[in-house]
Amino acid sequence: MRKKILLAEDDAFTRYMMEAVFNALGYEYDIASDGEECQKLILADPDIYGVVLMDLHMPNVSGVEAAQAIRAHPDTPLRDIPIIAVTAEDDHLDEDVIEANGMNGHLKKPIIASEVNAVVEQYCAG
């Protein structure tokens, strides 16, 4: 069974676009509006998510802070969930920066459906 995607994104337009991509590709997903809500959803049931697509700049708890908190968690399923940075900022697209922030890769905004599909196929396949 294919695992769900967790999208952590505060921007309404980006959420709308990502939902359109997810729906077109037939993916199941949940959406968190900030890093704090993202952490709560993962804590509630870490085994249902195959990947987290994490915006880096969100209110309350940023994507970087959320990723670091997830990586510091003592429970293995939670700690090991793949996290993909989603950003338009070129300085956050460096693989060393991504890895240092506890993330597994990145997607550049604006999002391209084929790139989302590749990430989901890599991490969420059943």
Image: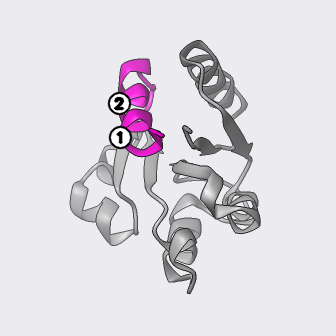
| Rendered view: 12 above or below 68 | above
Q: What residue did someone put label 1 on?
A: 122
Q: Is residue 111 magenta?
A: yes
Drawn side of residue 3 relative to residue 100, left or right:
right
Decide: marks 1, 2 in contact (CB < 8 A)? Answer: yes
Q: Label 1, label 2: how many angstroms apart (C-alpha)?
A: 6 Å
Q: Residue at x 32, y 71 (%)?
A: 100
At mark 1, the secondary structure is: helix
At mark 2, the secondary structure is: helix
Disc 1 residue crowd, few under 14, some 14–19, many 20+, Cα 10 Å: few
Q: Residue at x 57, y 76 (%)?
A: 69
Q: What residue did someone put label 2 on?
A: 118
Residue 95 marker = none
**In front: 105, or 50?**
50
Magenta region: which residues?
A: 108-126
Magenta: main secondary structure = helix
